[in-house]
Image (tube, coloured by chain):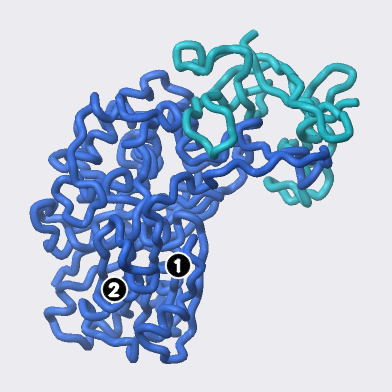
Chain colours: A blue, B cyan
Amino acid sequence: MSENVWILGIHMTPFGKHADKDVIDLASEAALAAMRDANVTMKDIQILGYGNLTGGTQGQSLQKNIGQTGIPVFNVSNACATGATALRTGVMAIKAGEADYALAVGVEKLAGAGLLTGNTAAEVPENWTPKGRQGAIMPLDGRIGTVGMPGLFAQIGLAYNNSDPRADFELFARIAEKSHSHSTLNPNAAYQSAMSLEQIMNDPMISYPHTRSMCSANCDGAAAAVLVSETKLRTLPLEQQRRAVKISASIIATDPWTDGNQELADVNTVTRNASRDAYEQAGIGPEDLDLVELHDCFAAAELVHYDNLGLCAPGNAIDFFNTGATWRTGKMPVNVSGGLQSKGHPIAATGIANVWEVATHLRGEAGPRQIEGAKVGLAHVIGLGSTAGVHILEKSGL
Amino acid sequence: MSIPIVDYLVLEPTPHLVAQECTACKAKVFGRHNACPACFNESFAEYEVPTTGVLKTFTIVQFAAKGIPVPYATGIIDCGGMDVAANITGVDPTPEVITRGLEVQLTTFPLGKDASGVEAIGFGFEPV
């Protein structure tokens, strides 16, 4: 039986514009606060999992600013699942018996970044020379499909349930309306203003059916977690044991072959596989969840993941949303933080920030947005490529 | 002289797309692969993709990297059981025109000549 793993300390910086801070300032802020929350220092940490997708920094850069102790660092890169992968690295080290304390950090500076796939088209060459595995003679973005995330996830959403025509612009806009409403209670969210359905639908169109306010918000932010083995946890003061949050499942999965998944990313199968394994590992089912933070990088993505995470009956995500189930007052609150559309999406921070959100509710420390009595929650991310990360968290029974 | 935008677009005798089909499990992919992503078999045969299909899903890109003309419609076409990513051409890129279930067919068009006068040929799918 491998060691159980708990979150002893965790922190998320406010998401938004941090013009006066660099990547390492943000990573340090999250890491130091998570260690204060855990009542440990760098002297206790035995392994560091670090993710910073676009900033080019390493965990070693963080160590040079908060404590160089010579421990192993695993610098991880898994697109938008980078933070979850850093966390998973720490979980594996503790489960393997190689560490009692692990630190996982995800950080990004992304405010004003524009399109993650580039804001200027690649140049058309002077001569046509076939290049690469498809013998392309010129850049393909815009000529054969789109590489842009808003358009990719638009296609994923409009394909929901064999291209159900009820999965339409207005439905996706109503999902964004929920996100922006939830964010009004989250002081850490990049955008904290409610938006009406009309405002959302009349916002500039990015990739139909996604308007700007239906897309994840580029912003700066960091999140960090201190993990501890259950054996070590039981030696700590009772108050720390009570606030600790159990990681009942920690899953990273990649996309298996499915027909067509090299033409359009199949984020459905990979999420279904990851959540199936997570529920099995945790020994619970989706009906046991009190709240879910899922990867709503675009409004259409949220719809498909209701189904992929088993929150509703297969094929029933539209009716499920229409009952109001996923609003914070519903029977299965989803993205009470405001989600990536409002809280923001500093890429590598996201997979730890959503764990922070769930853990904060389980500790009963979420303030005005607290889901009362929350005992079990799930955090999910998708990194295109593709990777799904699913973590199931449980409140301490002490 | 003309040249296709990608080597899986074959212009003669009539334009069509050619996929790589695993000789063992029949999984189909575009472009060069080292082994089959489904069954790891290392041999492929050429598979001629039907030139008509049904639009399964789409998007209309209004905001793209600078230099890419917008708006344009693009989507996934089910061509006889194989999914193909391509732009939808020959019609206005509006949600009134571009709909799921639209029956479409392969079409080709010139994309311009290079410094030595060779014409590039692109492809898309247009309503039948």
Q: Is residue B83 visible?
A: no
Q: Residue at x 21, y 77 (%)?
A: A37
The residues bearing labels 1 and 2 have C-alpha atoms spaced at a distance of 15 Å
Looking at the picture, tell me which residue is in the foreground, B109 or A168: B109
Residue A345 in the image, given as x and y percentages of width and height: 36, 52
Whether labels 1 and 2 share one chain? yes
Q: Is residue A187 above or below residue A74?
A: above
Q: Is A260 on the left or on the right of A338, as rendered?
A: right
Q: Is residue A327 above or below residue A344?
A: above
Question: Are the residues flagged by discs 1 and 2 in contact, CB closer than 8 Å?
Answer: no
Residue A16 in the image, given as x and y percentages of width and height: 28, 55
Q: Is B74 on the left or on the right of A124, as rendered?
A: left
Q: Residue at x 39, y 60 (%)?
A: A109
Badge 2: residue crowd in 10 Å (few <14, some 14–19, many ≥20):
many
Q: Secondary structure at mark 2?
A: helix
Residue A281 in the image, given as x and y percentages of width and height: 38, 60
Residue A29 tag number: 2
Residue A51 tag number: 1
